[in-house]
Amino acid sequence: MPKVRLLKKELYELIAAGEVIERPSSIIKELTENSIDSGASAVTVEIKQGGISYMRVTDNGCGIAPEDVPTAFLRHATSKIESKDDLSDIHTLGFRGEALASVAAVARVDVMTKEKSARYGVHYVIEGTEEKLCEECGCPDGTTIVVRDIFYNVPARLKFLKKDVSEGNDIARIIEKIALSHPDVSIKFIRDNKQIMFTPGDNKLFSAVYSVLGREFASSLIPVEYSMNNVKITGFTVKPVFGMKNRKLQTFFVNGRYVQSFTCIRALEEAYKNSIMEGKFPACVLRLELSPAAVDVNVHPQKIEVRFTEERAVYEAVYFAVKNAILSDSKPNEIELPKPRPNYNKPMFGEAASYVQTEIPSQPKEEKFSRIKAEDYAAAAGAAQPRAEKPMKNIPDRISAEDYRAIAAGKSLSSFKGNASPKSAAPIAPAPEMKAPPQPVPPKNIPEEGLPIEQLPPAPEPKEYKYINAESFDSRENAPEETNAPETPEYHREPVFRLIGEAFKTYIIAEMDDDIIFVDKHAAHERINFERMKSGEVDLKCQMMFDCPEVRLTYSQYDAVCENMQTITSLGFDIEPLTSPVIRVKGIPTILDVCDAADIAAELARNLDEHKHDPMPEILDDMLHSIACKASVRANDKSSPKELEAIVKRIFYDERIRYCPHGRPVMFKLTKRELEKQFKRIV
């Protein structure tokens, strides 16, 4: 066996320095954290060539006493702790006593420091653990440390550094995290003689986020403030509609220290489940405050990773803090239309169209409004196309008593005789009402020449629809009135809106106050069904099937189905395991169509297999999501005005319905002001 010997001082200090100092960003992190621990209210960080040749950190903190300066560069020298009991009550960012010693071991260091009560400061120079100079000097209060030529004495480490740009970017990321963790400290970052970042230090987290991450990101945030399990959570999290492509903007601070915590990341992403689009990730800037005894910051040489004594308590605090913030953000996203930029060189209608200026024929003076026929307008534009539907002509202005009784019986207007022929008369649908209209009572004395159409009451509408039951959907309307019923809360009051119609058989358009609301009917109905099933408002009863399909699964999926038969039954399914790996679907929830039986059973098995190690509520959420998607009205489905009204009303009744379970937004709004700006009514 080779002889055991002690390493030389310069050798073991280089080895120890390698655990703390990996690259220039490691030095900037240690020095900046020391500046914050000194009580500084302003810190300036300057680098050149990615920090490889030059780094400077200046603060206005308490400074270092002249007799303590040489000691500060010895290994395990610190002013932060004195006994082993202090390790369980750490309130500072640096406490190991390794930062300055490690920096001096691999670089040339100049220090100028002065206490506020001292007349003179100290200029101290150390290179590779060897002291070069220690003298009095004149300097401002605080400390300035200049680091030059990192790894000048360790060429093997120097050659593994990245390009200047990459090393500078690493430093910029470190400075950003420190600036966000301490909004009470004004931080300035200068890179190659250019100021890159500056935070005001006004102790407002939003100001720091705005300065560091930009206006666009800051405008997408919602505030978070919550306390649970002796853990206080404050900060901001992003609106679900602004999901990110990666996790780079998931930022967590524990007692002012930037950390990477799998517990926090998992809690954050679980809170966004069924609210954010698949493939997108949430972003946040969250600060956790808890007892120092409940967190161990001494598990990583660079103090980036931490360990909590009660991981579950931290998980629940983060989860419920973010979940409540998402649910409280009930305002629909506002559409911002771009400013119109007319291009007169581009055809108005299709490629073959040409810009033609036409004169509108004058109308008689007694006409209050002038109108242009669709055919005339298309011909003037040079792009008249055949239309699938002809404009309505010869609409009768009066209707006979026989036709009126037909309306009361619920017959189509297309069969009426009136004053126009059936071929030329177009069906007229009654205007949608907020509540089901009463049955019309025909007037007693109907003249032979008929009644004016505008005097007719609306025809009755059916109460049952394919996807939405108006009575069960809004049971508050049809519930018997109670004489001693309390006043209706603001949350449940009838929303006042006017249904304009539907675009592309997919998007509901409604007018409310000074806003136009656009609703994706599939996304909205999917979320409505999801929340109704999750809250128990809809009972998932099983409907037995005459034709029972057999579904072939993977062996692991088959085993998962066999192990979770009770969960499957609670979801309204009746599944019989056959010879592995085949199952027979005998019944499905009444809310589903029988044609979806095989697909939804296969998806059920896949979810059960994927969530073997997850809590049961997550499995149920995934399955309720799948059932809600299959049971909802789809794009291009024909919907009646009453169905559309029911969807819009439910959205305003329930503030949870702002995103579909996939995370897509349910509704947007266009303000009257934005519309008037487009038409230049206002500037």
Image: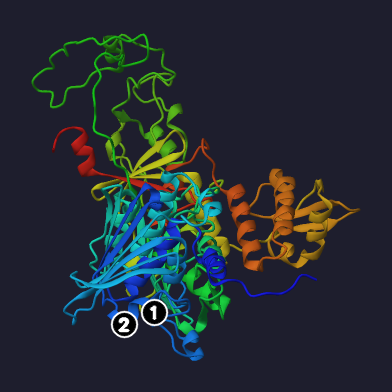
Count of marks placed on residues = 2
Location of the N terminus by quadrant is bottom right
Q: Disc 2 designates what residue?
A: 67
Q: Amino acid at mark 1?
A: Thr
Kind of residue indicated by mark 2: Glu
Q: Within 10 Å of the Cα at label 2, are there few (<14), some (14-19), or many (20+) other Cα atoms?
A: few
Q: Position of residue 385 (x, y in %)?
A: 39, 12
Image quadrant in which the C terminus is located: top left
Q: Is residue 49 above or below residue 567?
A: above
Quarter of the image for residue 107 reads: bottom left
Q: Mark 2–mark 1 contact, CB under 8 Å?
A: yes
Which sits in the foreground, 379 or 34? 34
Residue 71 — which label? 1
Q: Secondary structure at mark 2?
A: helix
Residue 214, percent across and down? 31, 51
Regarding residue 649, the answer to whether it shows in the image is no
Q: Is residue 255 above or below residue 11?
A: below
Q: How far apart, in angstroms, are the residues tagged by discs 2 and 1?
A: 8 Å
